[in-house]
Amino acid sequence: MSGPISKHASFASRRVARRGGVLAGCATGFLAALASASLAQSNDQIPNLTSADFGWQSNVADWQQPPPGHGHGPIKPDPDHPYTSNAEAARTGKPPTKRLGDHKDPVLKPWAAAAMKASNDEALSSVEKIPFAAQARCYPGSVPGQLLFPFEPVYFIQMPKVIYMIWQRDHMVRRALLTDKHSDKPKPTWFGESIGRYENGNTLVIDTIGLSTKDSYIDNFHTPHTENLHVVERFTLEPDGQHLTAIVKVEDPDTFNAPLTMMQRWFKAKERMIETVCAENNFDYFSQGLFPVPMAEKPDF
């Protein structure tokens, strides 16, 4: 997948392509060194999520229902327009459909319901119209939406004072500082300001505020939020050591009438990180009105 890029950016991409093997090797070596450092600091109270030899992969791009007792779950598909993914279509023979969220869910504030309805109406206005999806158009997925990036692993680096999450796709990076206090007024950004802690010897808790609203959604149904969004993610290593589950609580009193709680689950992908690039030659070849991919106005080097 790739997209229109400037003359200079194209030159930069060619240089990156020529050095792809070097970059991938450096990334793997970097992960291996940091994994060794983090393991040296580890103890029985910290779940081991870090390795250069494995990441965590999900093949599901939508939030799952959490266990009972967590209140309102994720926003679901519009019941008037049931969703069929490409994978399900291939398996069942049904035609795939577009992702349209249930804008009538009573948990939504009026402005949020109206925004979702407008997004649905736009998608339904033409057979060719494809709604924006961050992972398809090479943008960060924000928080918590980044957890829905499927089919490629995410790798953890656990250091004494900071935790990094690096997605293989486009090498998106999140950082969580191991501290117990947020800044007073963090500047809104794609991934916000995250702080973390460990609990019960098997759980990593990440608390995030300061999230930008630009092209940022809770899910792939275009559920919006405000800059008052507060997200708490609880990553728990399952007893078999082969699966990782996140229970995610979303609070935004300006958008939702109650908190939302959602779940994502990964399996251990026993493979090293490779270099994958999203925004190369990703043109709108079929005139689907695709959201433009990020473009550089000048080269980075």
Image: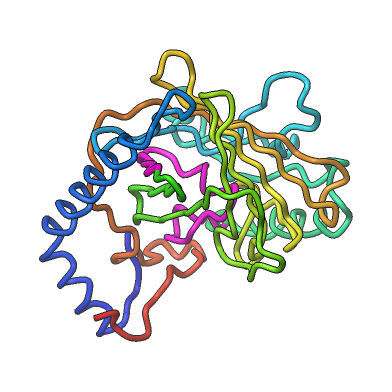
> Image quarter for residue 211?
bottom right
- In the displayed structure image, the side of residue 202 where residue 109 appears, left or right: right
Which residues fall within the magenta stretch? 132-158
Residue visible at 35% across and 56% down in the picture: 170
The residue nearer to you, when weighing 201 against 207, is 201
Q: Is residue 225 left or right of residue 155?
A: right
- Tell me residue 276's x, y (percent): 27, 53
Q: Is residue 157 magenta?
A: yes
Q: How is the image coloured?
A: rainbow
User: As drawn, which residue projects farthest toward the top?
Assistant: 240
Q: Which residue sits at x=56%, y=55%?
A: 142
- Please count the marks in the image: 0
Residue 46 at x, y percent in the picture? 46, 30
Q: Residue at x 31, y 82 (%)?
A: 6
The quadrant of the image that shows the C terminus is: bottom left
Front-most of residues 124 and 261: 261
The prevailing secondary structure element of the residues shown in magenta is loop
Left or right of residue 49: residue 28 = left
Q: Could you tell me residue 1's position as x and y percent?
A: 32, 57
Question: Residue sitting at 42 percent across and 45 percent down?
Answer: 160
Q: Position of residue 97 (x, y in %)?
A: 56, 41
Does 212 lie within the magenta span? Answer: no
